[in-house]
Each structure stands twice: as C-alpha cells, then as structure tokens.
Image (cartoon, rainbow, N blue to C red):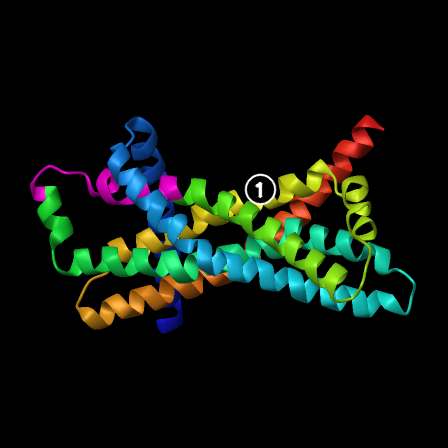
Amino acid sequence: MSELLLQFRFLATIGDYVSFVVSSFVTMFRKLPRWGLIREQLYSMGVMSLSVVSLTGFSTGLVLATQSYYQLYNKGLVGLTGLLVAKAMLTELGPVLTAFMFVGRVGSAITAELATMKVTEQVDAMICMAIDPQRYLVSPRLISGIVMLPLLTVYSVVLGVFGGYLIAVYFFGLAPTTFWDPIPTYVEPFDFSVGFIKSIVFGVLSTTICCYRGMVTVGGAKDVGDSTTKAVVTCYVMILILNFFLTLALNIMRAEIIRWFS
C-alpha cells in the first residue's frame, strides 16, 4: 500500500511540475516582467558565474588535451588532439559541465531564496497585494536562465579549446597549425547546434525545477535545506538523463535528414 501511495505521489509531483512549467511560460509570454527584474537576474546568473565557468571550461580543456595527446601519441595521431578537444567541448562536456556549475551556483540559490520567501509567507503577502508570484519571481529567472546558460556554455567551450591549445602547443610542443587545422574541416554546424540545443534545454530544466522546488516548500528552515538539496540532485540526474536522450535523438534526426537528401 505504501509503495502505491509513493507511486501516486510521484505522478502527482510530475503533474504539478508540468502544470507549473506551462503556467510559467504562459505568464512569461502573456506579459514580460519589468526589465529591472530581468537585468538583475541576468547579472546574478551570468556575470557572477563567470569565474566558476571559466575555471571549469579551462581545466576541462587542459585535461582533454592531455589525455588525447597521451592516448594518440603512440599511434601517430597527435594531429587529432585539437579536433577531439573541440568536438568533446562542443557536443558534450561544454553543455553538461556548464549546466552542472549553473545548477550548483545559481539553481541552489534560486531554490533557497524562493523557499525562504514561501515559508516566511512573503509569497502569500504578494498574492494578497494582487502581485502575481509567477510573473514577479519565476518569469525573470526563467528568462535569464534560458538566455544566460547558452552564453555561459559558449564561453566555457571557447576557454576549453583555448586551454587545450595552450597545453598542446606550449607543453607538448605540438605545432599551432597541427592543433587548429582539423577543426574547421571536421567540426560541422551540427556540432554547434547540438551544444546550443542542449544548453537551452538544460537552462529551462534547471531553472524550472529549482523554482518549482522553492515555490512548493512548506515548513521551516530544515525544509528549505531539504528543498535545495532535492532541487540540485534532481537537476543533476535529469541533466544526465536528458543528455543521453538528446544526443541519441539529434544524431538519429541528422542521419535521417542526410538519408532523405542523399
């Protein structure tokens, strides 16, 4: 009986979350929030995340180039080092690791802030004053997440490739042309589109999950911490799951498009 109740509760939570996401987009498109609210969130999510995203992207590029060089050196394929770094950063590691950093820094703060407002009845006070919490609290964060996570991903990818270039050229002695020449030849527009689509999906997912967890929190300080933990863990798990399905779906679509036009 308890297992059945847990299943119903799980399904009810999913339905409640989907309803929350739909109402958030409807509110956002019906009337945009004030520019001041959006600007504040853009600065908080984007500019304040540059340091952690910089470290993540740059160090990932260093590790990728190092591993690629040592794996390819004995096979005479060190000329592919730059290509492997660029491909991996564009399609997988750039979007996923940037989303992880985004959730850890921004998502946790969103959940904690909204959950604190909810348990201290600030959200209820806004409703009593005829202020829509969706428009005032959720929409600015949703818009900023959709805008800033793709931009942060691009920034992370650029730093990752640059870090790979530095370690490959100045440590391993690879010629700059050997590192750069294969990239424009074998990196396709599809690779850019994969990273961009993933970053948008991850931005929507992480922002809505964290906002939802914050807005449904009840109780006290302990419940705020529990909601924050659940939001971050849920985002990490969903990012990993969606990353697989997006990779599979986008590559299948690409293969079908090539087959249709060939």
Q: For the C terminus, which image quadrant?
A: top right
Q: Quadrant of residue 227?
A: bottom left
Q: x%, y% of residue 4?
A: 39, 67
Question: Residue 179: where, in percent of width, then height?
Answer: 79, 52
| Quarter that holds the N terminus | bottom left
Camera-side residue: 144 or 159?
Answer: 159
- Indicate the position of residue 154 as horizontal and vertical percent values: 56, 45
In the figure, 41 relative to 121: above or below?
Answer: above
State whether residue 180 appears in this view.
yes
**Which residue is rendered at x = 35% and y = 72% of the image?**
2
Please, what is the three-letter code of the amino acid marked with disc 1?
Answer: Phe
Q: Residue at x 61, y 45 (%)?
A: 195
Please give left or right for residue 173 compared with residue 108 in the image.
Answer: right
Q: Quadrant of residue 168?
A: bottom right
Q: Which residues are magenta?
A: 128-144
Q: Is residue 38 above or below residue 262?
A: below
Name the residue beneath numbered marker 1.
Answer: 196
Disc 1: CA contacts within 10 A as few (<14), some (14-19) or many (>=20): many
Q: Which residue appears at 18% of the width and 38% of the height?
A: 132
Q: Nearer the viewer, residue 52 or 112?
A: 52
Figure check: 45 above or below 235:
above
Q: Is residue 136 magenta?
A: yes
Dividing the picture into quadrants, the one containing residue 194 is top right
Helix, strand or loop under label 1: helix
Image label count = 1
